[in-house]
Image (spheres, grey):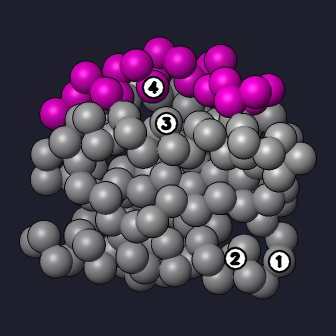
Amino acid sequence: MAKAKVVFASITGNNEDVADIISEALETKGIEVDTEEISQCDAADFEDVDICVVTPYTYDEGALPDEGMDFFEDLAELDLANKIYGVAGSGDTFYGEYYCVAVDKFDEAFTQAGASKGAENVKINLAPDSDKDIKQLEDFADSLIAAYKKNN
């Protein structure tokens, strides 16, 4: 059975909701999932799973979550070849050019670690509470699974 780790950083609870929707979608398709808050785990935990997911928030003008800085820095140093990854997060379009910048930065860190992108980045405005948002996150999970199956 494939294993996934979903790591989230959340102030308002929106990104925890994003993580929960993704985790549930993966579990529904038979993937074993561990979901954890970013300050409670190490980036090296991704070495023990097949599918790696991060759902970060963007703070202020494009800043990464303070509680996830060590995780972020360690992630880029890992060797995640043969791992599938995806990044999704919520933000507020009010911040314009800084909207969900952390999603893109984590995407770059996974690329630097040699992981294979399994789904396009997902950016949700505020809470993932519309049918469209939920469908987008479920499709994201399906893409991750399809990428995993293609590589194995």
Q: Which mark is residue 105?
A: 3
- Asked if disc 4 and disc 3 are in contact, CB closer than 8 Å, the reply is yes
- Asked if disc 2 and disc 4 are in contact, CB closer than 8 Å, the reply is no
Residue at (16, 33) in percent of width and height: 79
- Asked if disc 1 and disc 2 are in contact, CB closer than 8 Å, the reply is yes
Distance of label 2 from label 4 (alpha carbons): 26 Å
Query: What kind of element bears circle 2?
Result: helix
Distance of label 4 from label 1 (alpha carbons): 29 Å
Left or right relative to 35: residue 116? left
Disc with the residue nearer the chain's start (4 vs 1)? 4
Q: Is residue 10 above or below residue 129?
A: above
Q: Which residues are magenta?
A: 59-79
Q: Is residue 142 above or below residue 73?
A: below
Distance of label 1 from label 2 (alpha carbons): 6 Å
Pointer 4 local density, CA inside 10 Å: few below 14, some 14–19, many at least 20: many
Q: Which mark is residue 134?
A: 2
Disc with the residue nearer the chain's start (4 vs 3)? 4
Q: Quadrant of the N terminus?
A: bottom left
Q: Is residue 121 above or below residue 56?
A: below
Disc with the residue nearer the chain's start (2 vs 4)? 4
Q: Is residue 26 above or below residue 67?
A: below
Query: What kind of element bears circle 1?
Result: loop
Residue at (45, 65) in percent of width and height: 120
Q: Please state which amino acid type lies under the numbered disc 1.
A: Ser
Distance of label 1 from label 3 (alpha carbons): 26 Å
In this orientation, which residue lies closer to the viewer: 89 or 92?
92
Residue 27: x and y, percent?
47, 72
Residue at (33, 65) in percent of width and height: 118
In this orientation, which residue lies closer to the viewer: 137 or 62?
62
Residue marked by disc 1: 130
Q: Which mark is residue 72?
A: 4
Q: Please state which amino acid type lies under the numbered disc 4.
A: Phe
